[in-house]
Amino acid sequence: MKLYGATVSWNVTRCVVALEEAGAEYQIVPIDFATAEHKSPDHLACNPFGQVPAFQDGDLHLWESRAICKYVARKHKPDLLREGNLKESAMMDVWLEVEANQYTAALNPILYQCLVSPMFGGTTDQKVVEENLEKLKKVLEVYEARLAKHKYLAGDFLSLADLNHVSVTLCLLATPHASLFDPYPHVKAWWDGLMARPSVQKVAALMKPSA
Amino acid sequence: MAPMKVYGWAVSPWMARALVCLEEAGVEYEIVPMSRCGGDHRRPEHLARNPFGEIPVLEDGDLTLYQSRAIARYVLRKYKPELVKEGDLEGSAMVDVWMEVEAHNIEATLWPIIRHCIIGQYVGRDRDQAVIDENLEKLRRLLPVYEARLSVCKYLAGDDITAADLCHFGFMRYFMATEYAGVVDAFPHVKAWWDALLARPSVQKVMAGMPPDFGYASGNIP
């Protein structure tokens, strides 16, 4: 399996977490945005929107990190999706959507302002950061209540819903807001559990700018 | 078997996403109407169903689900698994891809246009043409990819309709009621795909509950 993109991108590393957990054989193929490699015909064949990540497994070309993660899990570790069980897979789908539409929706602007903008010589808009921190805290209150009742988000089993949070949360640790989880003990315990996983350790090492 | 319950307001494009899948699934369900302007979604009894205070919410026996795409997947997986290409590794991947494309590109682009072109006038918000133009630009860059895709297959994930197509309905319904429908019509395969969706009984049934002005002009404020 081939994953196209740079490991500085949390959308790319979202897929790496899934690939590692699924125990799939894969290679990361860097795409150079500076030389517009993402707009080359070869890359557009893989991802017609010219974005990363893009993914290839034999003749199958996929894009959109969460779709790639699902495919990898379905093929190599379907237990992460529980598709044979209507209720479990439904709860998993709910929390997959919550990750995208609530958690990462609030975290993305924070990561952009704190990590990406400075990388390109821009400034950090603190107002945007503050607004989204407030949103994220409200989201974390819901997570705290959920994780007080269940070990993992979809229930008492680890699922792709938990794993899809890893890459963006690793990036949060690199911002001044790394202690955001501290007031939420169950969220913190859930995160510490994820951090202890070999797959997550491997991705954390990959994401470090100077390895 | 008690009918499934869907909580929310039928004019919502997110509610429509769930309803059209329920219709396609052919399952018995009832809508439990809620009032958005009355703040029903923020009341404790609703927060008990969905702690994020949003709609739609689906109740099926003792299972309570939220997030329209999770509801869509559950209902189709239960009653019409071919619509999520269950058991087909590559097919289900394509359904997932185009559902993600819709989520990040279509909903995100059409909703600001819809808010400014349709809703704004009823809620005292000035129309911001810059926001509309910015999103129309994004849409104009997206549609060629859809056109290319729909030139090689009848529907987004292949030659059969799937959840990926159905999930586009709610936001497309309102966008195509704005003065910018021509932006989509300019792409013949996209137009044909949209017309095919509109012809489906499931879509027509749900659309009957979605007046193009969200009900504002007739006083049925959501």
Image: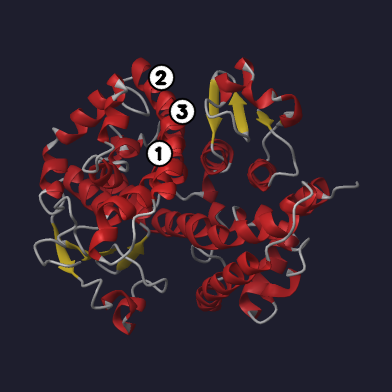
Q: Amino acid at mark 1?
A: Leu
Q: Position of residue B61 (x, y in %)?
A: 24, 66
Rounded to the nearest angstrom, the CA distance separating label 3 from label 1 is 32 Å
Asked whether, in this view, residue A202 is left or right of residue A77, the answer is right
Q: Using a 10 Å C-alpha cutoff, classify the residue at mark 1 as few (fewer than 14 neighbours), some (14 to 19) or many (20 or more).
A: some
- Considering every residue shown, the one lying at the far right of the view is A211
Picture layout, residue B176 above or below residue A10 = above
User: Along the polypeptide, which appears first: circle 2 or circle 3?
Assistant: 3
Q: Amino acid at mark 3?
A: Glu
Q: Amino acid at mark 2?
A: Ala
**Label 3: which residue?**
B90
Q: Nearer the viewer, mark 3 or mark 1?
A: 1
> Quick check: do tags 1 and 2 share a chain?
yes
Q: Nearer the viewer, mark 2 or mark 3?
A: 2
User: Along the polypeptide, which appears first: circle 1 or circle 2?
Assistant: 1
Picture layout, residue A190 above or below residue A36 = below
* C-beta proximity under 8 Å, tags 3 and 1: no
Q: Residue B148: which disc?
A: 2
The chain that hosts pointer 3 is B
- Per the image, label 1 sits on a secondary structure element best described as helix
Q: Nearer the viewer, mark 1 or mark 2?
A: 1
The chain that hosts pointer 1 is B
Tell me what residue is drawn at x 39 percent, y 53 percent: B128
Q: Nearer the viewer, residue A187 or B211?
A: B211
> Quick check: do tags 3 and 1 share a chain?
yes
- Per the image, label 2 sits on a secondary structure element best described as helix
